[in-house]
Amino acid sequence: MARLTPLKVRPGDFTLTIRTTRTIVSFTNPFILQGLEGIQPAGEYVVITDDEQIDGLSRIAYRRVATLFQTPATSASQLPIQSFSISPTELDAALMKDRHQTVVRH
């Protein structure tokens, strides 16, 4: 039987090339995003973005490789939070639309 040798890692052995950012976005009105089922209610949502460092440049730069949108579960049999891959451009458009909607009260 083969024995596994523990991997010894020292500071500086690895360079992380992915950075992850967690932000909270707020919608004041119900909204729709492709990839999500139906109309989502107004409220706060967590958005997680992964950016990969671009090598070979004279300064540090990143490119977006993933944007995840987290929603509460729709049923008790699911995990409490669900994550969906979305387009950052579509998210920005939905947020802009939400901010420019006007509410007419009579």
Image (cartoon, rainbow, N blue to C red):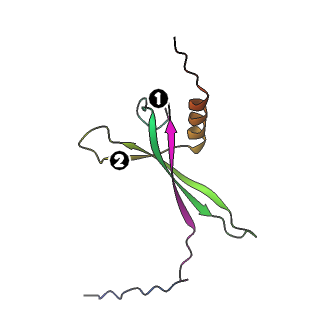
Residue beneath the point at 67% across and 69% down: 55
Q: Residue furthest right?
A: 58
Dot 1, how many residues are within 10 Å of its Cα: few (below 14), some (14-19), or many (20+)? few
- Hey, what amino acid is under mark 2? Ile
Residue beneath the point at 40% across and 33% down: 37
Regarding mark 1 in the picture, which secondary structure is present there? loop
What's drawn in magenta, residue-wise? 12-33
| Circle on res. 81 | 2
Q: Residue furthest top?
A: 106
- Tell which of 35 and 59 is nearer to you: 59
- Tell which of 65 and 103 is nearer to you: 103
58 relative position to 16: left or right: right
Dot 2, how many residues are within 10 Å of its Cα: few (below 14), some (14-19), or many (20+)? few
| Circle on res. 74 | none
Percent coordinates x, y for residue 84 in the rendering: 44, 45
- Between the C-alphas of marks 1 and 2, the distance is 19 Å
From this view, report whether residue 91 is shown above or below residue 17.
above
Percent coordinates x, y for residue 38 in the rendering: 41, 30
81 relative position to 21: left or right: left
